[in-house]
Image (cartoon, rainbow, N blue to C red):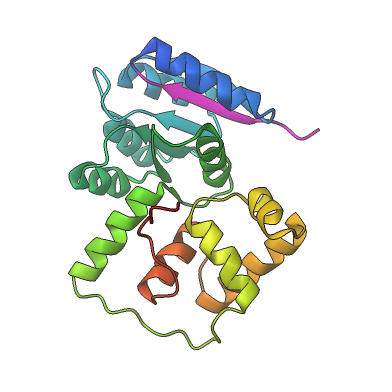
């Protein structure tokens, strides 16, 4: 078996930490190696244990998750940072991303979505909650950044099916089940989409596709 993803978990509420730890470790390939109840302790734990991923709340005593993230980047620590918070306000989103976080997920996300976000960050990609992704796209649109049409062809009908499910937060496995295709086939479609749009992550894929009008980030009553 491969090594589990080592995680430092920081949140000032013990009950919240316990719940997050339980469903992260239930995934089977994630190990929470240290916990912290404030920002100073979180930074100390990251320095000491050198985890693969640090899962941080924003509002913590002594240092905020934003300040911890900034310190991690200033010290060039080789750690992926996933901010897990209840706040989706624009100033927080901007501050977190500018500090250098690799992911921003809301606490009302499902346990599967949070586990997937840890994996995504560990793989060196950006993990954004769909709510946060919509905010970023809206900001870009309001700033007058017109989408550029790609030189490559549009996605095939099956690739569009995969793209829509990615937009709605489905994992590769869930997409395979939904479309009745293998997970390997799903990965092939995603690789093709990456190539057509010239992107390197699922988040970039969704944001770019939304800019081009291929998918909508607005939820409908049926979702």
Q: Quadrant of residue 193?
A: bottom right
Q: Quadrant of the N terminus?
A: top right
Which residue is outermost to the right?
Answer: 1
Magenta stretch, residue numbers: 1-11
Q: Position of residue 97 (x, y in %)?
A: 31, 48
Q: How many marks?
A: 0
103 vs 55: above or below: below
Residue at 66 percent across and 68 percent down: it is: 189
The percent coordinates of residue 191 (x first, y second) are: 64, 68
| Vertical arrangement, residue 4 with respect to residue 40, above or below | below
Instruction: Give the residue furthest to the top.
Output: 14
Depth check: give the residue in front, 87 or 11: 87
Q: Is residue 53 visible?
A: yes
Is residue 201 visible in the rendered structure shown here? no
Q: Position of residue 71 (x, y in %)?
A: 32, 34
Q: Is residue 93 above or below residue 199?
A: above
Instruction: Tell me the residue at 50%/39% (across/down).
Output: 78
Choose between 183 and 178: the one closer to the eye: 178
Q: Compared with residue 136, is residue 98 higher up or lower down, i.e. above or below?
A: above
Q: Residue at coordinates 24% horizontally, 70% vertically from top-left? A: 141
Decide whether residue 35 is among the magenta residues. no
- Residue 210: x and y, percent? 39, 69
Between 212 and 9, the residue placed more toward the observer is 212
Q: Residue at x 31, y 63 (%)?
A: 137
């Amino acid at each position: 078996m491969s090594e589990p993803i080592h995680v430092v978990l920081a949140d000032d509420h013990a009950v919240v930490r316990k719940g997050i730890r339980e469903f992260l470790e239930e995934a089977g390939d994630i190990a929470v190696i240290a916990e912290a109840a404030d920002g100073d302790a979180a930074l100390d734990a990251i320095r000491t244990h050198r985890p693969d991923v640090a899962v941080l709340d924003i509002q913590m005593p002594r240092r905020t998750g934003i300040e911890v993230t900034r310190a991690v980047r200033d010290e060039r620590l080789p750690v992926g940072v996933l901010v897990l918070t209840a706040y989706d306000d624009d100033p927080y989103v901007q501050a977190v991303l500018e500090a250098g976080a690799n992911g921003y997920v809301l606490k009302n996300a499902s346990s599967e979505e949070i586990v997937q976000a840890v994996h995504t960050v560990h793989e060196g990609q950006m993990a954004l909650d769909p709510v946060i992704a919509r905010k970023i796209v809206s900001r870009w649109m309001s700033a007058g950044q017109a989408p550029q049409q790609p030189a490559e062809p549009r996605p095939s009908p099956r690739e569009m099916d995969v793209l829509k499910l990615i937009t709605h937060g489905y994992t590769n496995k869930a997409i395979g089940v939904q479309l009745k295709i293998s997970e390997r086939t799903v990965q092939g479609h995603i690789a093709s989409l990456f190539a057509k749009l010239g992107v390197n992550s699922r988040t970039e894929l969704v944001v770019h596709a939304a800019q081009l009008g291929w998918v909508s980030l607005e939820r409908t009553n049926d979702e």
